[in-house]
Image (tube, coloured by chain):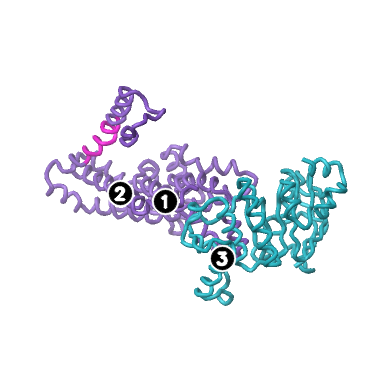
Amino acid sequence: MNIEIEELAKEFGTTRALHPVSLSIPSGALVALLGPSGSGKTTLLRILGGLEFPTSGRVLFGGQDATGLSVQERRAGFVFQSYALFKHMTVFENIAYGLRARKRHERPAEAEIGRRVNKLLDLIQLPDIGTRYPNQLSGGQRQRVALARALAIEPRMLLLDEPFGALDAKVRKELRQGLREIHDRTGLTTVFVTHDQEEAMELADLVVVMSMGRIEQVGKPAEIRAKPATDFVRSFTAA
Amino acid sequence: MSDIALTPPVPVTTEPVLIRSLLIGLSLVFVALFLFAPLVTVFVEALRQGWGATVDALRLPDAQAAIRMTLTIAAIAVPINAVFGIAAAWAITKFDFRGKAFLITLIDLPFSVSPVVAGLMLVLLFGANSTLGGWLIANGMPIVFAFPGIVLATLFVTFPFVARELIPVMIEQGRAEEEAALTLGASGWRTFFTVTLPNIRWALLYGVLLCNARAMGEFGAVAVVSGKIRGETATMPTMVEMFYNEYLSVAAFTLAAVLAMLALLTLLLKSLLEWRHADLLAATRRH
């Protein structure tokens, strides 16, 4: 599903987190929102997910206005920076949460829920951890569980906030590959936020460089490397 | 303590034996002198004239009315304050709004205002001499020197307990888990019952137990508002005082002992729950 962002702006009190920005994300793309902290990238992601609402502007999902849609209606799979797994639930219950939260007539039977959760555990290559609690997992495992939980709701898109931020370099490389594979297999339009230009360049089809609440440049990694549009992009991607 | 001492390599935080025993001894003496001895005295005094006298004291209609009154008040005030405490803590920790600092100060007000003053405020607000109080009495709903007044006074003095326990826990937990539940399609209520409530249940339990202890034990505010009418508005603490002033010391201490036992019971309940859910507590409390 393609995403259109039209003149989107966000103010928190008197501070402007986002100047009016426009962006179009093609269906099935893997997009990185790249920028330093305070660049507005997380705000933009949270607006897409329905966790914040814009001060002005519109968001279109698959050509339909989604600006006023509630967070539940968006059906966006969201992976949080520190994963936000439910500490008091097992991995199985975490992943099943979104299915069990559905309205009665849309809710799959318990056996079907079990089948789907196990399929997702296979997808993230952790088939045997269903009975464990989040605090019994490594950082990399938690991240993958968070991804499985987001995928369980059969989302229309996947949104990830610094998905590799809290991990060490080796695990980060592995999980990058993992995200790429899951993206390619599901074909979901995927947007992730990062401050790591190497990560953005290596993983994304399309990189959106942001600074101070503005979009500086949008392009394929190679284009941004070859032709940085502004001094900021040049210095930030050279770092 | 003991397993620290038993570990062969001496931890850097260990003090010399002399200082350690001095500190431990000091705390033990303090606890024994100021906490344990008075508690024991209450029970000793209650039983001074034998079990018969104690049981007779419990049979006094005034004593039974006071026990009933205190339990009823606690049964009403504690759930109300649990709900309002959760609501206040929720509002303060999950939303940003103008006047938040003021609200936090306001929640602490019952802690800083003397209970007697709190009682007096209610008398002035709802008493026969105020417009509101006059109207309520004229319409057959007296507040002061009646049951509703005692509930109000108890609600006032016990308001901060639940909120105060919850606020730090909820601040520490942040909003991420709730946001995650919402993105997964859960409604606000579902998020509250399946994510927020399980995360705060221990803090909530402590808050409720403290609130309950205070609700049953409150003297000052209730004494002023209730008028201490025997068999009608006297609660256990106020009845204890009245018995004591009338030199009915066995009756006074018996009732005091029942009150103390109710408090000990809540503590026991808390310990029992902690012990029963120790592994779960360890698994879910921190990462």
Name the amino acid, label 3: Asp
Question: What is the drawing colour of chain B?
Answer: purple
* Residue pictured at 66% horizontal, 54% vertical: A176
Magenta region's main secondary structure?
A: helix
Dot 1 falls on a residue whose secondary structure is helix
* Residue pictured at 61% horizontal, 45% vertical: A168
For marks 2 and 3, give the CA distance. 46 Å
What number is the disc on residue A122?
3
What number is the disc on residue B268?
2
| Residue B251 falls left or right of residue B87 | left
Name the amino acid, label 1: Leu
Number of numbered discs overlaid on the protein picture: 3
Q: Position of residue B179 (x, y in %)?
A: 61, 56
The quadrant holding residue A2 is bottom right
**Disc 2 residue crowd, few under 14, some 14–19, many 20+, Cα 10 Å:** few
Give the residues drawn in magenta, as a range.
B30-42
> Is residue B77 in view from this perspective?
no
Q: Nearer the viewer, mark 2 or mark 3?
A: 3
Q: Position of residue B208 (x, y in %)?
A: 41, 50
Chain under label 1? B
Question: What is the drawing colour of chain A?
Answer: cyan
What number is the disc on residue B281?
1
Chain under label 2? B
